[in-house]
Image (spheres, rainbow, N blue to C red):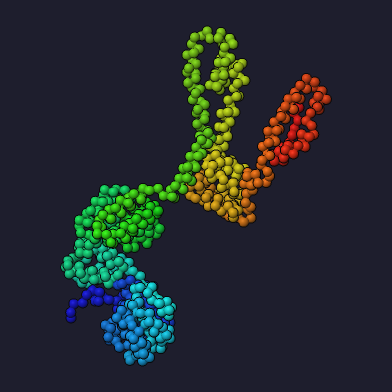
């Protein structure tokens, strides 16, 4: 017997031999078992994925003895005739060479004749998309209502070129690309049967070069056996077909992710000098970055077509850049791939693409700017506030000057006859600086008790009151009611991150449970809700709530149709009343203290008549400007005693 290539010798003979198309095989087996057989089938898929083999196996099952049956004998005489293409009732037609209307009319005339040996008469048309529009139209009626003994099976690699009216009359099956791991395992099985020592890495390299086609992989293995003999290594595969190893591609990707431009360019130079096809090398590099993106989304799916060594490298590299950076790199390399197809100097474009990829990883994206605005710039605007609020810094500033002050004053009293100077009128102008430095009373009392005591309270409201306002921020610990908690919480947000408080002003506290703070927004304020739900804002709010309550808290932002839009915006804009005359009454009301000043001379007579002698006329209270000011500011006029 003459030599037979692997692609024909190891063609699938039964449904169990079909690899990587479980969804198609299961549907056809169930259809045969349940006697739910359609009159037309359409197999769609890339080259070498098993379209013709599946069609022949399906025809064997339909025409087997006692059939249709799943468990047919592949070595039966009728099955062998179908496999070899010489059965009179199973006609295989090449759509590329029989694509005219005349051939389809002849087929339509022969359909009415019954089969000779088989139960069904099966017409298998390969590359059916090559038929002309007239041929398709001539086939429509027969395809829709064929005789009971006729079955149509179509196969194509380009389903988009088939008329929709043809597709709608068929049951469509999409055959997928076969995973690299399945191809490598099957190649190892064939090599074992042929007595060839095939390295596992070499099998994966062949599967990767076959791009999901089992027939291509078997043809490549056949060629390698002729080249290498009984032992095939990964380097043999790379040398014969010009492929690049997965490790080399992963190494170049690592150089790009590490921004090592020199090493990346050296890797491109080495592959070019080794005679590798740079177009395929670039395609492998793009595929590697695509694998990194899949690794970030679904780690299990990313490792399906990878060797164990490359899979470990992919896991490490997927953590070196975020999704947006990887997408920018893939977009840039895809543009380079489009230019390289028509360029004479492919290496030049490849190197420029590598340099651009390194630069794109260092660019600042819009999301980075938004995140910086949420965290960095908002805090930058509020930088002065935290410095004043934090209790430790002001206390240290108040205490630090007190330590050098005694050091300076201890040598000063060394000339003991200083009390005489203290009694003279000169110390009076010197005592204000003494009061500023020596705020605590102990040392001030030692030197000048009478003047120091009345001036001590003056600096306290200026410096220490602000420190006391910030102390509740550092010592939350107590349980607050919801209203008190929300008011304090919004106050802290106002101090630490002013940009976020405008969004909180549109919110309403719905409730505080054990670990959750539920906040509602009216539907018109959905933008405020979405702004607060950004990661930078939500982390800040949850950290602030934990600081107040002493336990981990989570925020739940919801849209509630029962809530009304905030009205404070209208009041602030002065839409409820006229803003123009509002400031004038304040200016005209300033003479009112003069009225009070006129009443001051009446302090001497302490009688009831003097106290009951306010002089503001009634016209003053009836003045429209005064009444508008009283209504707007909710004020009440009180006479001075």
> Which quadrant of the view contains residue 6?
bottom left
The answer to whether 307 appears left or right of 230 in the picture is right
Tell me: residue 207, above or below residue 97. Answer: above
Residue 598 spot, x, y in % from top left: 75, 24
The answer to whether 1 appears left or right of 410 in the picture is left
> Which quadrant of the view contains residue 229?
bottom left
Residue reaching furthest front? Answer: 580
> Which quadrant of the view contains residue 288?
bottom left
Residue reaching furthest right? Answer: 609
Q: Nearer the viewer, residue 340 or 186?
A: 340
Q: Nearer the viewer, residue 337 or 235?
A: 337
Residue 265 spot, x, y in % from top left: 26, 51
- Residue displayed at 49% across by 37% down: 383
Residue 540 spot, x, y in % from top left: 50, 45
Q: How many marks?
A: 0
Q: Is residue 18 visible in the rendered structure shown here?
A: no
- Residue displayed at 29% across by 53% down: 352
- Residue displayed at 55% across by 32% down: 467
- Residue displayed at 32% across by 50% down: 358
Q: Is residue 158 visible in the rendered structure shown here?
A: yes
Q: Nearer the viewer, residue 366 or 83?
A: 366
Q: Nearer the viewer, residue 413 or 594?
A: 594
Question: In which quadrant of the rendered image does the N terminus lie?
Answer: bottom left
Question: In which quadrant of the rendered image does the C terminus lie?
Answer: top right
Tell me: residue 158, above or below residue 472. Answer: below
The answer to whether 581 appears left or right of 437 in the picture is right
């Amino acid at each position: 017997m003459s030599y037979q290539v692997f692609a024909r010798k190891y063609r699938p003979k039964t449904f169990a031999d079909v690899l990587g198309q479980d969804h198609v095989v299961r549907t056809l087996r169930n259809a045969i078992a349940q006697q739910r057989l359609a009159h037309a089938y359409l197999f769609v898929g890339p080259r070498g994925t098993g379209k013709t083999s599946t069609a022949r196996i399906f025809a064997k099952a339909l025409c087997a003895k006692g059939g249709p049956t799943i468990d047919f004998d592949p070595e039966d005489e009728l099955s062998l005739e179908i496999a070899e293409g010489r059965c009179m009732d199973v006609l295989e037609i090449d759509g590329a060479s029989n694509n005219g209307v005349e051939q389809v009319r002849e087929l339509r005339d022969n359909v009415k004749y019954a089969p000779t040996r088989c139960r069904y008469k099966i017409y298998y048309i390969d590359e059916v998309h090559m038929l002309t529009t007239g041929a398709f139209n001539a086939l429509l009626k027969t395809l829709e209502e064929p005789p009971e003994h006729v079955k149509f099976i179509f196969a194509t690699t380009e389903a988009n070129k088939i008329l929709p009216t043809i597709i709608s009359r068929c049951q469509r099956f999409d055959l997928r690309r076969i995973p690299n791991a399945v191809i490598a395992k099957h190649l190892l099985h064939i090599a074992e049967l042929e007595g060839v020592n095939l390295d596992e890495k070499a099998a994966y390299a062949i599967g990767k070069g076959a791009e999901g086609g089992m027939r291509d992989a078997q043809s490549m293995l056949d060629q390698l056996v002729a080249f290498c003999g009984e032992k095939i290594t990964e380097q043999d595969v790379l040398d014969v077909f010009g492929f690049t190893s997965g490790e080399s591609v992963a190494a170049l990707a690592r150089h790009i992710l590490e921004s090592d431009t020199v090493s990346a360019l050296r890797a491109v130079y080495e592959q070019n000098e080794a005679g590798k096809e740079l177009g395929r090398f670039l395609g492998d590099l793009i595929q590697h970055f695509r694998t990194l993106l899949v690794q970030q989304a679904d780690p299990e799916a990313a490792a399906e077509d990878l060797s164990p060594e490359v899979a470990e490298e992919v896991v490490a590299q997927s953590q070196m850049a975020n999704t947006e950076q990887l997408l920018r790199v893939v977009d840039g390399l895809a543009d380079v791939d489009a230019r390289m197809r028509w360029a004479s100097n492919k290496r030049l474009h490849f190197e420029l693409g590598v340099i651009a990829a390194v630069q794109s990883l260092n660019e600042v994206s819009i999301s980075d700017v938004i995140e910086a605005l949420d965290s960095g710039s908002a805090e930058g605007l509020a930088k002065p506030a935290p410095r004043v609020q934090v209790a430790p810094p002001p206390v240290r500033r108040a205490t630090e000057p007190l330590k050098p002050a005694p050091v300076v004053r201890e040598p000063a009293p060394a000339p003991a006859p200083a009390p005489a100077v203290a009694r003279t009128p000169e110390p009076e102008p010197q005592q204000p600086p003494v009061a500023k430095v020596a705020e605590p009373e102990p040392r001030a009392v030692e030197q000048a008790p009478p003047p120091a005591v009345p001036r001590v309270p003056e600096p306290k409201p200026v410096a220490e009151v602000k420190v006391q306002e910030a102390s509740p921020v550092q010592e939350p610990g107590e349980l607050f009611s919801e209203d008190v908690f929300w008011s304090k919480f919004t106050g802290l947000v106002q101090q630490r991150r002013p940009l976020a408080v405008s969004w909180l002003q549109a919110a309403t506290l719905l409730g505080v449970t054990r670990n959750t703070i539920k906040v509602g927004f009216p539907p018109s304020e959905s933008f405020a809700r979405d702004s607060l739900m950004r990661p930078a804002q939500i982390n800040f709010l949850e950290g602030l709530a934990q600081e107040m309550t002493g336990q981990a808290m989570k925020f739940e932002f919801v849209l509630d149709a029962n809530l009304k839009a905030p009205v404070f915006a209208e009041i602030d804009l002065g839409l409820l009343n006229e803003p123009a005359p509002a400031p004038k009454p304040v200016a005209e009301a300033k003479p009112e203290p003069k009225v009070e000043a006129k009443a001051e001379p009446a302090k001497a007579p302490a009688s009831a008549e003097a106290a009951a002698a306010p002089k503001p006329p009634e016209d003053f209270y009836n003045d429209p400007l005064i009444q508008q000011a009283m209504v707007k500011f909710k004020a009440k006029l009180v006479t001075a005693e």
